[in-house]
Image (spheres, helix red, strand yellow):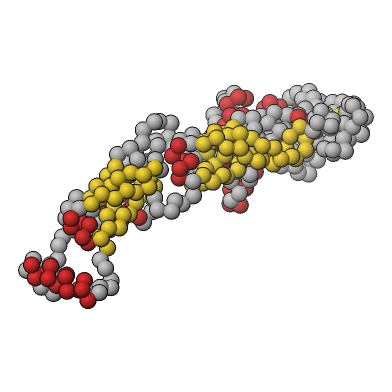
Amino acid sequence: MADHYQTLGVSRDASADEIKKAYRKIARELHPDVNPDPSVQDKFKEVTAAYEILSDSQKRQNYDMGGSNFGGGGFGGGFGDIMDAFFGGGGSRGPRPRTRQGQDALIRIEVDLFEACFGIEREISVESAIACEKCQATGCADGASPSMCQVCKGRGETQHVMRSVLGQVMTSRPCSACQGYGSVITNPCRECAGDGRVRARQTISIKIPPGVETGNRIQLSGRGEVGAGGGPAGDLYVEIVETEHEFLVRDGETLHMTLGISMSAAALGTTVSVETLDGSTDVHVKPGTQSGATVGIKGKGMTRLRSNHRGDLIVHIEVQTPTKLSRDEEELLKKFADLRGEKVGDGHVKNHDGSRFSKFRDAFNR
């Protein structure tokens, strides 16, 4: 049987706050609304079961004494029930509150490269649980209040006599009539059906900081789902999905683009105006530039997250060889080749610059 302390990653002398923090941290990663992967749902149930035991002082005491290691058997109850009877069970826990902590929520939004670089404030529409206005989150209709449960008399527990190895003992269990609340809602609110909350769509303003990229999450505390009975709301997580740009490729803080130029422009040198995230910028191509060469432009890349620093823009030069020549163009090229002493079929194998080649390859194969 799994060790509940090990499941939550806490020590056996952990405080209630430490147990709660450990559970919330793990639950945020495994909760079905955050991580829909079916393979982690069993783990989520195991973590929740461990928290339910260790967050309740009486259940934790029983567990520490070995209560959870014994299932119900032929004696009408488990070892935990027996320990309950002898060590402070019997109704001392009292009714559980109707208000509960709300769940966290996760939504994904798309941002383009410009928005990711400079940040943006955006309004998003979110559907989640909010407090019911009609009953003010009480769950009762017409201003009524929950009535004391007549079965458990408000204790939230009922006592049962059971037979055990020690003879007949008295145990306490959550009242099945009121589900342990100690009270019942006899006239539930028609709007929320007694839950104290309803689902509604609301608009939230969110600031997306400069430098975000796909996978980054923005936490909005208290903007998740309101808990049952008007309990405190969970957190809302906004996950960023960056859309692909038409001609710019992102590599962290660095941006890459490909600039195609003619053979004559590469040979003679030229200046070309290109569009960047900051507007038009001139790219100066030196005479004799070869295809595959790069030109760096400082400060025209992406913003570093939580910083004002900007990366660079790397322009990759692609010399374009014409595929169709007119008769006059062909004659001119032949004369040019003669002037340079070049012959058809001339050529040689040239060792490539491995580091530059690998960087160029990696940038466009991500």
In the image as oriented, which residue stretches furthest toward the bottom?
A: 327
The residue drawn where x is 54% and y is 29% is: 11
Q: Identify whether 36 is placed above or below 299.
A: below
Q: Residue shown at 22%/61% (left/top)?
A: 263
Q: Is residue 102 left or right of residue 154?
A: left
Q: In this view, does 187 lie to the left or right of 61?
A: right
- Residue 177: x and y in percent read 88, 36
Q: In this view, does 270 lie above or below 200?
A: below
Q: Is residue 145 left or right of residue 266?
A: right
Can residue 147 be seen at all in this image of the molecule? no
Quarter of the view holding residue 127? top right
Task: Tell me the quadrant of the picture where the N terminus can be found.
Answer: top right
Q: Position of residue 111 (x, y in %)?
A: 51, 44
Q: Residue furthest front?
A: 328
x and y, in percent, of residue 186 in the image: 92, 33
Residue 262 place in picture, x, y as percent: 25, 60
Is 356 or 161 nearer to us in this picture? 356
Q: In this view, does 41 lie to the left or right of 362?
A: right
Q: How many labels does the image show?
A: 0
Q: Which residue is drawn at 43% across and 31% down?
A: 306
The residue under the point 65% across, 41% down is 125
Q: Can residue 292 be seen in this view?
A: yes
Q: Which of the pair 310/18 is nearer the observer?
A: 310
Q: Quadrant of the C terminus?
A: bottom left
